[in-house]
Amino acid sequence: MENIGIIPSTPGKLKPDKYQPYIHRLRLSKLTLWSSMFLAFILLFFFFSPPAAPLPAAATPRRDSWGGPDWEKRVSKSARKSSSSGITVLVTGAAGFVGCHVSLALKRRGDGVLGLDNFNRYYDVNLKRARQKLLARAGVFIVEGDINDSALLRKLFDVAPFTHVMHLAAQAGVRYAMQNPGSYVHSNIAGFVNLLQVCKSANPQPAIVYASSSSVYGLNSKVPFSEKDRTDQPASLYAATKKAGEGIAHAYNHIYGLSITGLRFFTVYGPWGRPDMAYFSFTKDMLKGKQITVFEGSDGGSVARDFTYIDDVVKGCLGALDTAKKSTGSGGKKKGSAQYRIYNLGNTSPVPVSELVDILEKLLKVKAKRKVMVMPRNGDVMFTHANISRAHRDLNYMPTTDLEAGLRKFVKWYLDFYSVSKNKSA
Ligand SMILES: O=C(O)[C@H]1O[C@H](OP(=O)(O)OP(=O)(O)OC[C@H]2O[C@@H](n3ccc(=O)[nH]c3=O)[C@H](O)[C@@H]2O)[C@H](O)[C@@H](O)[C@H]1O
């Protein structure tokens, strides 16, 4: 404490000259001490650190070969539109649930569609392969590759004249983020940035529509959730990466003139859905006579979701693509301000999870073995409820499928699909 007077109270302000030799000596000995400690630390780290752990399976992209004349022909053919008024769309995550449905809908109405998917192992790859076959029959080719592969993305833009990108590739799932946080950063942040980098340099730049999530509302308690509400309290890393995606999209719109539209999906369900989601895993377990876990609030209140049927969401996606204005940049530079939009795509009618199970019991004709437990602190929120007036106004979005009608279609698909494969992968 006796030397306290020689320490400058304001950074940059020096004390009188009489202390200079002392300060110099003190600095030299301190410098030597810190340098030795730093060197020792580096050496210790080098010798004793374990080898870097490989990314868990879900995050590991497949290393696929691409390129060559045959491959380019398949890309061009798939991306060719059959209607003169059609658009040419690159759909990322095309082997995923929403990606598969959106690709089919676009192709059916005459648009050119090329899929891109890394076929990671987050859930049953056989289901993704089955979706791929469905798309192949409709004339949609899915390129196997990762959105983090810049060379591949650039090549795709060289081969096909994309007017739009429908970006649906993501690491999904709210609770899995606690097990494998890196996969969310890899896909939802790094992958998205990589895609936008390629899009901003493409000539012409495409218009981009991308998937955000209802989870960005996090702990927001004002209902129904409106796009004007706060989204700065994410309850999971998944939500945080989706919110980061919205910020990243805004920056690319602002700097490079990319036309960008974000869609906040609310618990989308239906045929060809995701096995990690509750309605899907409940169906599987109920048919096997296994117990299912139904979460409730700590006060016994029910957990509810604004479950939204896939066909309704697909209409919202197409509405967003059709109303997207052109990007304004070229040569990687902004030439004027560009469209930036964000919309809720929900059902506007939340249903408690216990009621979801009631409906499944009725449709499957099976009594569920329910274990009701307090919702663990795993990133889940108590309820979601969308205000869709903005999407209705701008995209003509209007969901028409209630949960029972949608689940009936899902159950029919589930029974057909898994009986065909003799319950091997169910
Ligand atoms: O809107 C979104 O943006 C997100 O929707 C989806 O997330 P969630 O709404 O959490 O759907 P989902 O897992 O089907 O759980 C449904 C309900 O069942 C409850 N739940 C779940 C599991 C369980 O064992 N028990 C249970 O009660 C659970 O507490 C919840 O209340 C997507 O997965 C996500 O990728 C993202 O797109």
Image: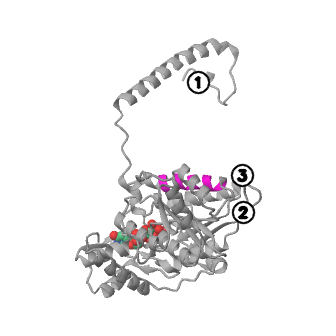
Question: CB of mark 2 within 8 Å of CB of mark 1?
Answer: no
Q: Nearer the viewer, residue 129 or 191?
A: 129
Q: Is residue 198 magenta?
A: yes
Residue 331's tag is 3
Q: Nearer the viewer, residue 183 or 323?
A: 323
Query: Would residue 159 be found to the left or right of residue 93 on screen?
Result: right
Give the CA separation, mark 2 to mark 3.
15 Å
Q: Which amino acid type is shown beneath numbered disc 3?
A: Gly
Q: Which amino acid type is shown beneath numbered disc 2?
A: Ala
Q: How is the image coloured?
A: one colour
Query: Would residue 304 be found to the left or right of residue 162 on screen?
Result: left
Q: Secondary structure at mark 2?
A: loop
Query: Which quadrant holds residue 86?
Result: bottom right
Instruction: Magenta stretch: give its range.
Output: 186-200
Q: Nearer the viewer, residue 184 or 235?
A: 184
First reached walking from the N terminus: tag 2 or tag 1: 1
Q: Is residue 228 magenta?
A: no
Helix, strand or loop: magenta stretch: helix
Q: Is residue 152 above or below residue 262?
A: above
First reached walking from the N terminus: tag 1 or tag 3: 1
Residue 338's tag is 2
Labels 2, 1: front one: 2
At 35% from the left and 74% from the top, the residue drawn is 280
At 55% from the left and 60% from the top, the residue drawn is 243
Instruction: State the residue lying farthest toward the right.
Output: 336
Residue 124: x and y in percent read 34, 65
